[in-house]
Amino acid sequence: MNRGDTFEIIEQTRRYLRHQEELFGRELFLKRPGVLGSIHVSTELGTLVGFQESMNDCQKCSLAKTRRHLVFGAGNPRADVMLIGEAPGKDEDIQGKPFVGRAGQLLDKILVAIDFRREEVYIGNVLKCRPPGNRDPLPEEIVLCMPCLLKQIEIIQPRIILALGRIAAQTLLKTKASLNHLRGGIHDFQGISLIVTYHPAALLRNPQWKRPTWEDIQQLRRLYDERVGDKPKWRPPKR
């Protein structure tokens, strides 16, 4: 059974339990006495899908008035690697998915370079709604949106986080240090290894940053092989 089949079984089970809850309430009684007795079943926030459903109509800040879609995140709900950017852009706001524009296409190529597919990782942002004109997130917007990101991380339980860009890195690490200062090291985020690199959108404007980004991505792959090690041995391509 592959991971996709496992996720489908989990999702089918979630839908079944929700249906049972609607019919009989939240107490699930087992026929065999002595085997747990009764279980309190709560499915709304127990999975990433359930949490997303609870967030779709978020109105916590003024960005709810200007967005087209809330961009919750996308990818493998049990990913070992989670990528976190700053906020959705124009294309993401239109489609409701993260990193689907030119920057997203570049991100896909970066992942492929270390033998990863987008479907293997989970991709999200600090903010779930596009700031007007793609301006930087305001401090109050970050404060209001961070609980959502923290809940995503709690559900996914990644082994490694890749922070894409200055704002994502500074927000997660609670620092004002520059991106150049944060790059190159392995940081700790609540027990999760965190690596910092440039945002793909910045690479489109500054091609000279592609080389240091490649160094960061190779570090990510080496760390993955060390901490997870479920992929064939990887060697950097000769350039």
Image: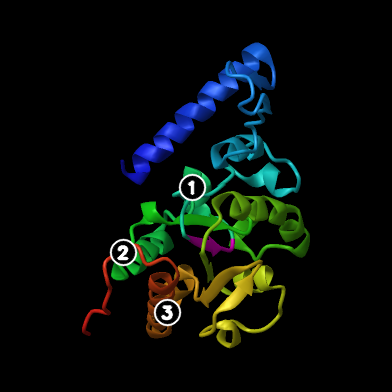
Name the dominant secondary structure of the magenta segment.
strand
Q: Locate residue 110: give its quadrant.
A: bottom left
Q: Is residue 128 above or below residue 196?
A: above
Kindly give the residue lying farthest to the front in the view shown: 34
At horizontal 40% and vertical 75% (from top left) the residue drawn is 217
Nearer-the-camera pick, 189 or 145: 189
Q: Position of residue 220 (x, y in %)?
A: 43, 74
Q: Does 84 lie within the magenta span?
A: yes
- What color scheme is it? rainbow
How many residues crowd mark 3 within 10 Å: few (<14), some (14–19), many (20+)?
Answer: some
In front: label 3 or label 2? 2
Give me the C-alpha separation between circle 2 and circle 1: 18 Å
Kindly give the residue lying farthest to the top in the view shown: 23
Mark 2: which amino acid? Lys
Q: Which residues are magenta?
A: 81-86
Residue indicated by mark 3: 219
Residue indicated by mark 2: 231
At horizontal 59% and vertical 40% (from top left) the residue drawn is 52
Q: Position of residue 208 (x, y in %)?
A: 40, 85
Residue indicated by mark 1: 77
Q: Locate residue 223: give its quadrant.
A: bottom left
- The disc, 3 or 1, on the residue closer to the chain's N-terminal end is 1
